[in-house]
Amino acid sequence: MFKLLLIEDDATLFQEIKDRLSSWSYEVYGIMDFSNVMQEFTAIKPDLVIIDIQLPKFDGFHWCRMIRAHSKVPIVFLSSRDHPTDMVMSMQLGADDFIQKPFHFDVLIAKIQAILRRVYNYNTEEVSLKTWCGAAIDYEKNLVANELGSIELTKNEIFILKQLIEQKNKIVSREALIKSLWEDERFVSDNTLTVNVNRLRKKLDELGLGRYIETKVGQGYIAIEEGISYA
């Protein structure tokens, strides 16, 4: 879960943005004392900062300078000011983007997702090997293997399997899977998800693993460990 620091003094707007971002599983923090932004920034250690220009005490440009002096964390300006010099200034200070108010929330979330993917997902080495129910899973090569042989999965199938295994023994809702696929730019419908899960389970059957992906009617899916049953 990514931590976002929203530096916004309009309480109503802050709460609205926080609620919308939280619905996308982001952990959103605000500022209690606008004279000590850096102290709270240091304590929170956010993965991305969203900041307004017009703030109490010091403006957003001041805090952008302060943050950039200590961190390379992505910064997005969110402001009602529309003068070109404000946008140029924000970029010169090291901001990653500038979004003008009023804005459409889909634009904000798309820009946040793009920045987080670029900064963290693409530049961070990820563990590509995993063991589950005695099988070795290679996320990079889309392969699952055990003593019975090996199978190759599609990108969607390995993505779904990874989401389930990372939360093994817990029910993952259909909505959460679809949202994860959407965030990863794999656009799927509810019906497409069903088809992919059925194909995944059928392929896993070749290795005797299909039964460890269970469907929970009205709830979602669960990847269980061998020998564990969840009724």
Image (cartoon, helix red, strand yellow):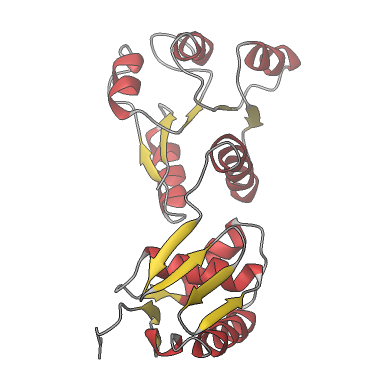
Residue 60: image location, x then y, percent: 50, 16
- In this picture, residue 130 sits left or right of residue 156: left
Residue 218: image location, x then y, percent: 40, 87
- In this picture, residue 196 sits left or right of residue 213: right
Above or below 114: residue 82: above
- In this picture, residue 76 sits left or right of residue 228: right
In this rendered view, identify the residue nearer to me: 64 or 102.
64
Above or below 144: residue 184: above
In this rendered view, identify the residue nearer to me: 185 or 19.
185
Above or below 124: residue 21: below
Inspect this view and state whether residue 178 appears: no
User: Residue placed farthest to the front in the image?
Assistant: 147
Residue 17: image location, x then y, percent: 46, 43
User: Residue placed farthest to the right in the image?
Assistant: 84
In this rendered view, identify the residue nearer to me: 8 or 197.
197
Residue at x-position 40% and y-position 14%: 56
Residue 225 occupies which quadrant of the picture?
Answer: bottom left
Residue at x-position 45% and y-position 68%: 136
Inspect this view and state whether residue 118 appears: yes
Residue 4: image location, x then y, percent: 42, 36
**Total count of labels:** 0
Residue at x-position 62% and y-position 74%: 153
Where does the C terminus fall, quadrant-wise? bottom left
Residue 178 occupies which quadrant of the picture?
Answer: bottom right
